[in-house]
Image (cartoon, rainbow, N blue to C red):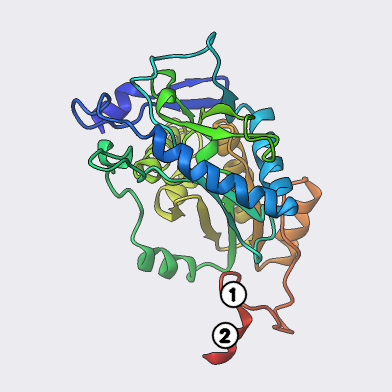
Amino acid sequence: MRKFEEGISYKDERYKVKLPWKPEMKNALHNKEVASRRFQNLRKSLINDPVYFSEYSKVLEDYRKENIIESVTEENEILSEDNCFYLPHRAVIREDKTTTRLRVVFDASSHSKGQLSLNDCLHTGFNLLPDLFLLLIRFRIYSVVVTADIKQAFLQIEIHEEDQNYTKFLWTTDPENSNSGEILRMTRVLFGVTSSPFLLNATIKHHLKRYVDKFPHTHKLLENNLYVDDVHIGEDNFDKALIVCLENYEIFKDASMYLRKRRTNSPELFHKLNERNLEVDDFPDFYNQTLVPSKMRPSKLMEQ
C-alpha cells in the first residue's frame, strides 16, 4: 500500500498507477513466440467470421480513439525488446449484456515453457472489497435504493509509462494478409491482470479521501457500499437519495469515471435523474414482475 500511494499520480481528472512488481521480476519475461502463435490462431477465426472481426475491430478502434491503446513505433518505444511482454488476447461475447456485447480479454497468465507469466511477476494486492453479505443487508434497510456501475472502470486508470512495455499485443486490420500486422500496447489498467482489481479499488479509495470533508455522508456510503465497480446505496427518502446521487456523479466525474445503468425502486427519483441526463435504465414494473436476474439465463431460472 505504501508503494501504491508513492506511485499514484493525478492529472487532468485521471489517475496513473504503477504495476505492483515483485522484486527483480521485470527482466524475467519472454513470451513473444507464444503470443505470435496464438495470434495466428485468432487471425484464422477472424477470417472465418467477418462479423466477429468487425466487432473485434470496432472495440479496438474505439480504444484507439480514447487513447486506451496506442501503436508502438520506434519513436515512442519505451524499453528494448528484451524488456517487454506480449499479451495474447481473445474476445468474450455476452449475449445478455445491454451495453458492450464483445469484450477483449488479455491473457496475462500466458508464458513460454519454463518461463514466467506477467501475473507471476506481479503482486495480487490486498482484497479491499467490503463484506458482500453485510453490503446486501445494509442495502435492504433503505426505503429508496439506487444501483449503478462505473463505465469501463479499469480502463479509466492509466498505467505508468515505464510499465506500458509489458502490455504489448499483436493485431491486424487485414487478417487475410499474412504479412500485415502491428504492435499495440495498452495504456490503461486491463482485464486479465492479477493486480487489476486491487489497482482499481485502491485508486477509488485513494480518490474518495478527497471528499471526506466535502461530502462526508456520501463518502461514507461509498466506502462501505462499493463492490469493485458496482454502487449499491440507499436513503430513507427521495430528497436524500437525490443529493447522494448528484454527489456520486461529481465524485466519480473528477476521476474520469462515469456511473451508468442506474436503477432505483423510486419512480420519483427515476424521473429526476432522467431529467438531469444522468443515465438510468428503464423503470421496472414491480407490480407485473416479468424480469429475471440479469446474469441468470431464463432456462436456469425455470429449472430452479
Residue extending farthest to the front is 178
Number of the label disc, if any, that sits on residue 293: 1
Horizontally, residue 121 falls left or right of residue 192, namely left
Extreme residue toward the left, this view: 23
- Given the current orientation, which residue lies at the most extreme right position? 275
Q: How many numbered discs?
A: 2
Rendered image quadrant of residue 225: bottom left
Specify the quadrant of the image occupied by residue 125. top left
Q: Amino acid at mark 1?
A: Pro
For the residue pair 221 and 239, the one nearer the viewer reads as 221
The percent position of residue 233, horizontal first and vertical second, equals 52, 57
The residue positioned 65% from the left and 61% from the top of the image is 97
Q: Are circles 1 and 2 on residues that touch, CB within 8 Å?
A: yes
Residue found at x 38% / y 64%: 132
Front-lying residue, 200 or 130: 200
The secondary element bearing badge 1 is classed as: loop
Residue located at (44% from left, 68% from top): 136
